[in-house]
Amino acid sequence: MFTPNHFIWIAICAVMIASLTFCSIKFKWSMKTSLYVVSGISIASELCKVFTHIDINPTTGAGTIEPGALPLHLCSITIFIYFYLALTKPNKATQHLLDFVTPVSIVGGLLAIIMATSGVNFAEPYAYQCFIYHAGIVWFSLYCLITKQVKMTIKVYITNLVTLFALSIIAIWVNGALSAYNTNFMYVVRPPAKGLPLLNLDNGWFAYYGVLLVAGFILLTLVSLPSYIIDKVNEKKTLSTAEGGGAIVE
């Protein structure tokens, strides 16, 4: 982590996020167009991951994907949501999904880029898959916030916290079922990297899981709060303008 290669990848991701954000806002991409773009990035990412994580049985010659490569991490789950949103007409259910994946993708995407748990070797296809995909979902989330496709209300914030907690419980079940394969989806089994402060198993798993939940709460709050404040400020400005415009001048 934080090697020369890692810094290069961070710079590449920053350029990609900035470029896609500029183009989508400057040229006023529709929601459908943006969903098709992020879905395309998701397809390329998942195909790369699948074909670089195939285990070939030396006896039968059969190929199977490593269980740890299944799209069951928090950021990977959003792939299915993007496809669903792209192929479905907007409704209350799609809005709830969009409200959830937007802040979660910013948190998960940036953490994946910073922590580089998939490696930073330019000779490894998995590094390209990891960094480009996470840069793509961070861009899409920024697009949703900037274009007001998503508004971080108190209700949305609380719903997102409850959903995130529920997914962590489901991840515990899934990792338990796949324990023979040493999976660690959503990092509820063990830390994503060694030597992390607080996020470690020094005080036992329950303490680690508690810290993980608190970290998720703090990060989700840090992402949601600025958007909530900006929306409230804009609402007050709009209200003040409307009240001022309605005054009768004699």
Image: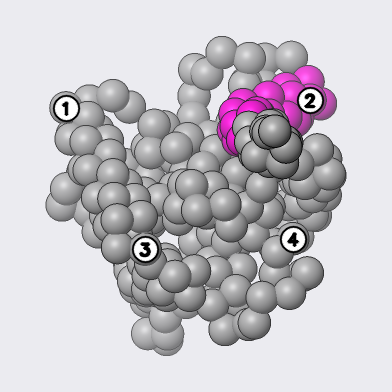
Mark nearer the viewer, 4 or 2: 4
For label 3, count other residues whose C-alpha is less than 10 Å away and answer few (under 14), some (14-19) or many (20+).
Answer: few
Front one among 42 and 63: 42
Q: Residue at x 22, y 29 (%)?
A: 7
Quote the CA–CA distance across marks 1 and 2. Answer: 34 Å
Main SS category, magenta section: helix
Q: Secondary structure at mark 3?
A: loop
Label 4–label 3 contact, CB within 8 A:
no
Q: Earlier in the sequence, mark 3 or mark 1?
A: 1
Name the amino acid, label 1: Pro
- List the residue tagged with mark 2: 210
- Which stretch is magenta? 205-234
Q: Secondary structure at mark 2?
A: helix
Q: Secondary structure at mark 4?
A: helix
For label 2, count other residues whose C-alpha is less than 10 Å away and answer few (under 14), some (14-19) or many (20+).
Answer: few
**Residue 115 shown left or right of residue 167 in the figure:** left
